[in-house]
Structures are given as structure tokens and as C-alpha cells.
Amino acid sequence: MNAQDCPFEKIIPSELLRDAEYFMAHAFNQAIEAWKIDEVPIGAVIAHEGRIIASAHNRSRAANDPTAHAEILAISQAAHALGDWRLNECTLYVTKEPCPMCSGALVISRIKEVFYGLPDEKMGCLGGALDLGALPRSNHHFTSTGGILAGPNHAILQAFFEKKRQYNATDKTNDSAAI
Ligand SMILES: [Zn+2]
């Protein structure tokens, strides 16, 4: 299997019910796009008045930029699309609970609400490790809901890192054979 061969199929959600799972399916499909370019498969979309105005996936490797997380890229796209840095009428959907950097950017963007897939109790900052959406002295609070399409969102990350481990093990075997 090539690094870019993603074993996951895109989810085609029904257009009739635009609920959290509908938008999360689009975020999941972005995660597949990330896998295809050998990025950690995390995807995000931002909805405004029921319409997707931004969609992005992790690009840290491709951009050689540690800030190129799906959420940061989606926030910039959405602000650009609206011509306003305040996203107080926008909802973000992301396949994994946002890290400290992205959670901070969501506070600063004044996002209305966040839905995420896989919770992350180690680095997640919307309720996992801590909740930046509920800073006690901040003027801007927002709610976050985890566990949306948690199965596929967990499976794709698990499979990606498993594949990485296998590649690394194969590389080491080849190295020692060459010596
Ligand atoms: Zn992040």
C-alpha cells in the first residue's frame, strides 16, 4: 500500500437533514484528503446559516508550518469568505477535539459553537484536558459537543498511525539488512 492509499471511503450524507452528522461527514471527507497527501487525517468545516463556507484539512507537513491545522485554516477561510474576523454566527465541525492552539483561535474568532468527533483527553482543549471555551473571565463562551461520528473519526486516525508504525518498522528492517 502506498502512503497515499487511504482505505477509508468518503461519506456521502443526505442533503435533507443538515444536522451535526451531516457537517461532520464533510469534515471526515476532508480528513481523507489529508491522508491522501500523507498528513495526519484531521478535517474541519465551518457552517454559516446552514451552508459550508470553509473546509480544510491538516497541512502541517505540506506547508512546513506547525500552525497549519485544519481548524486554523478553516477559521481563516471563513473570515475571508464573510469579510469579517468575527465568526459569532458560525459553527465549526472538526474530526478530533481541537488542540490548545486551535481552541485558542476559536475563542479569539468568537465562534458560536463547536462539534468535534474524537475526544482528546491529553491535548484537547474544549473539555478533554481543559475547556478554553469556558474561560471564567473571558467575555466569550461557547459550547462544544464531542463524539460526533466518533467511530469513523477514531478509526481513521488509529489506522493512519498504525500504518506509520508499520512503515517505520519496515524502514528499520531495510536499514539493518543494508548494513
Ligand atoms: Zn490544532
Image (cartoon, rainbow, N blue to C red):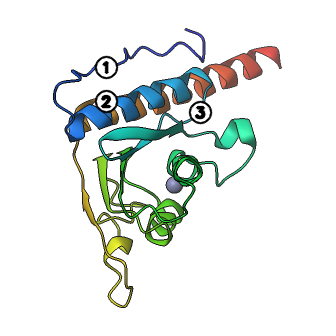
Q: Residue at x 57, y 46 (%)?
A: 77
Q: Which mark is residue 25?
A: 2
| Residue 125 spot, x, y in % from top left | 39, 66
- In the rendered image, the vertical position of residue 67 relative to residue 4, given as above or below: below
Say whether marks 2 and 1 touch (CB < 8 Å): yes
Labels 2 and 1: the sequence-earlier one: 1
Q: Residues within 10 Å of mark 3 (few under 14, many from 20)?
A: many
- Within 8 Å of ligand 1, the CB of disc 3? no
| Residue 26 spot, x, y in % from top left | 37, 30
Residue at mark 2 to residue at mark 1: CA–CA distance: 6 Å
- In the rendered image, the vertical position of residue 162 relative to residue 58, given as above or below: above
Q: Nearer the viewer, mark 2 or mark 3?
A: 2
Q: Which residue corresponds to mark 1?
A: 11
The residue nearer to you, when weighing 128 against 15, is: 15
Name the amino acid, label 2: Ala
Q: Residue at x 57, y 48 (%)?
A: 69
Labels 1 and 3: the sequence-earlier one: 1
Question: Which part of the image, by quadrant, shows the C terminus?
Answer: top right
Q: Residue at x 62, y 28 (%)?
A: 168
Name the amino acid, label 1: Ile
The residue nearer to you, when weighing 127 against 134, is: 134
Q: Which residue corresponds to mark 3?
A: 39
